[in-house]
Amino acid sequence: MEEQNQYTSPEYEGFKQKLRKIIGLDLNSYKNQIHRRVHMLMDRWGVKTYDDYFNTIKNDDKKLREFLDHLTINVSEFFRNDKQWWKMRDELIPELIRKRGHKRLKLWSAGCATGEEPYSLAILSAVCGLDASAPVLAADIDQGAIAIAQKGVYLKRQLLNVPAEYLAKYFTTRDGGETYEVNAEIKRRVTFKRFNMIDDAFGNGFDIILCRNVVIYFTTETKSLLYVKFFNALAPGGYFLVGSTEQIFDYKKMGFEMAGPFLYTRK
């Protein structure tokens, strides 16, 4: 049974409403796990009232960045759960090219965080010879995360799953090899966009959509609504990939078919 929301005071409700107005984040769509994080950070900062908490977030960009990082866990790495990526490279993308009869595939990283996932997708796009004029759409609610992603600079530990030939071809080393920058060719293959998946309209006709380790933080009701939106955004024959801790329980009712572990398709 879904855990009931314990955070229902009028003051907290006011805080959530004001927060949504300035950054578009609807905390009511999230599980209690996220609400606990909100209050843990409030305690850590030593803030006593919700008004002071809101004003701190509103007036200090660094505090806003810390707040969003604390809530949304923008932690990722290139080619995370690498078997899924090699299946995409070796099976899914070649299959889609054959089905579509062209190499202009429509790819979307939903909840792209600081860019590791969409750049991984863009590397596979280059490796598979996809049309560079159809860039990967990378969307996230967090403008600060997007700004980091657009710079394309990462620590060595974030690239442990990157094959050596990809590292040599698609990255430039910096700081004596401690950091790596995604090269211009791969950056051109990604378009970043601020996007609120709760409120904003989804596009359609996507061949591959990745939304991994994002939906897990939402309530059961919100998850279901989002999965239906993702289904409708897929082109027939397209693929939807979720995180390795996620499962769509009612996928058949939504129209999905299972295509593999953590992988769904629209027939």
Image (tube, rainbow, N blue to C red):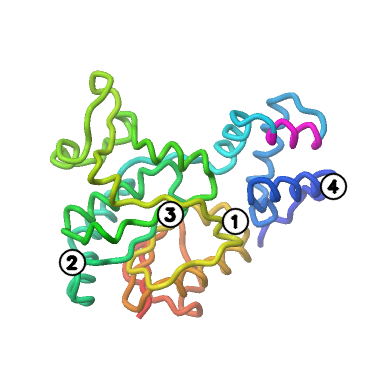
Q: Give the alpha-carbon distance from disc 2 to disc 3, as whole Å.
A: 22 Å
183 w.r.t. 8: above or below: above
Circle on res. 36: none
Q: Nearer the viewer, mark 2 or mark 3?
A: 2
Which of the 4 image quarters holds residue 152?
Answer: top left
Q: Nearer the viewer, mark 4 or mark 2?
A: 2
Q: Residue at x 19, y 37 (%)?
A: 167
Mark 1 sits on what residue?
218
Please name the amino acid that badge 4 sits on. Ser
Q: Quadrant of the N terminus?
A: bottom right
Please name the amino acid that badge 3 sits on. Arg
Q: Give the alpha-carbon distance from disc 1 to disc 3, as whole Å.
A: 13 Å
35 w.r.t. 251: above or below: above
Circle on res. 94: 2
Q: Position of residue 218 (x, y in %)?
A: 59, 56
Q: Give the alpha-carbon distance from disc 4 to disc 2, as whole Å.
A: 53 Å
Give the secondary structure at mark 1: loop
Q: Residue at x 65, y 57 (%)?
A: 29
* Residue positioned most to the left: 165
Q: Position of residue 87 (x, y in %)?
A: 23, 59
Mark 3 sits on what residue?
212
Q: Residue at x 15, y 40 (%)?
A: 169
What span is in magenta? 50-58
Give the secondary structure at mark 2: helix
Q: Nearer the viewer, mark 1 or mark 2?
A: 2
Mark 4 sits on what residue?
9
